[in-house]
Image: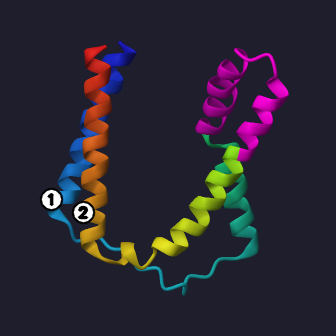
Amino acid sequence: LMRYGGAAFLIWYGFQNARSAWQGGHALAADGAAQTSLRRTILTLLALTWLNPHVYLDTVVLLGSIAAQYDSRLAFGAGAVTASFVFFFSLGYGARLLGPFFSKPRSWQILDGVIALTMWAIALRLLLM
């Protein structure tokens, strides 16, 4: 049931991205003019950190079950922390570097098309298991 439900969701999500790629018209307009208070920024940070269910699913369930397979859990934990740091550091700086690229609507169409194909490939794999 979970496999078919997951595949159905991925097919639907892929369709949404394919439709967005076909229609186009989206662009990133990050001019840096938006200002938020420090309080609002910290509250958003705390909400994204502690209220995000993926934090618990990825950290406790996924990484915990994988770590249980290894004898050196400390080394596994250090590697997971390092990989997480590198990923989020790269995500932050990569977003800044890719800002000019994603200011063009065509870039978003390409990204949406790639996401649609990826979701459909994962759904197909789930259905053929």
Where residue 23 appears, as percent x and y from the top left, is 16, 63
Q: Tell me, for residue 22, which label it has, or none.
A: 1
Where residue 122 appears, as percent x and y from the top left, is 32, 31
- Report if residue 28 is visible in the image: no
Tags 2 and 1 in contact by the CB under 8 Å rule?
yes
Tell whether 98 sits left or right of 10: right
Please give the residue where the numbered disc 2 appears in the rendered image: 109
Q: Secondary structure at mark 1?
A: helix
Tell me what residue is drawn at x 36 percent, y 17 percent: 3
Magenta segment includes 127: no
Tell me what residue is drawn at x 71 percent, y 38 percent: 80
> In the figure, 102 relative to 19: above or below?
below
Q: How is the image coloured?
A: rainbow
Give the distance between the C-alpha atoms of the residues marked 2 and 1, in whole angstroms.
7 Å
The numbered mark, 2 or 1, whose residue comes first in the sequence reads: 1
> In the figure, 81 relative to 70: above or below?
below
Where residue 79 appears, as percent x and y from the top left, is 74, 38
Q: Nearer the viewer, residue 66 or 35?
A: 66
Location of residue 12 (image quadrant) = top left
Mark 2 residue type? Gln
What range of the chain is rendered magenta?
A: 53-82
Tell whether 29 sits left or right of 109: right
Tell whether 99 sits left or right of 77: left
Mark 1 residue type? Trp
Q: Quadrant of the C terminus?
A: top left
Q: How many marks?
A: 2
Q: Residue furthest right?
A: 74
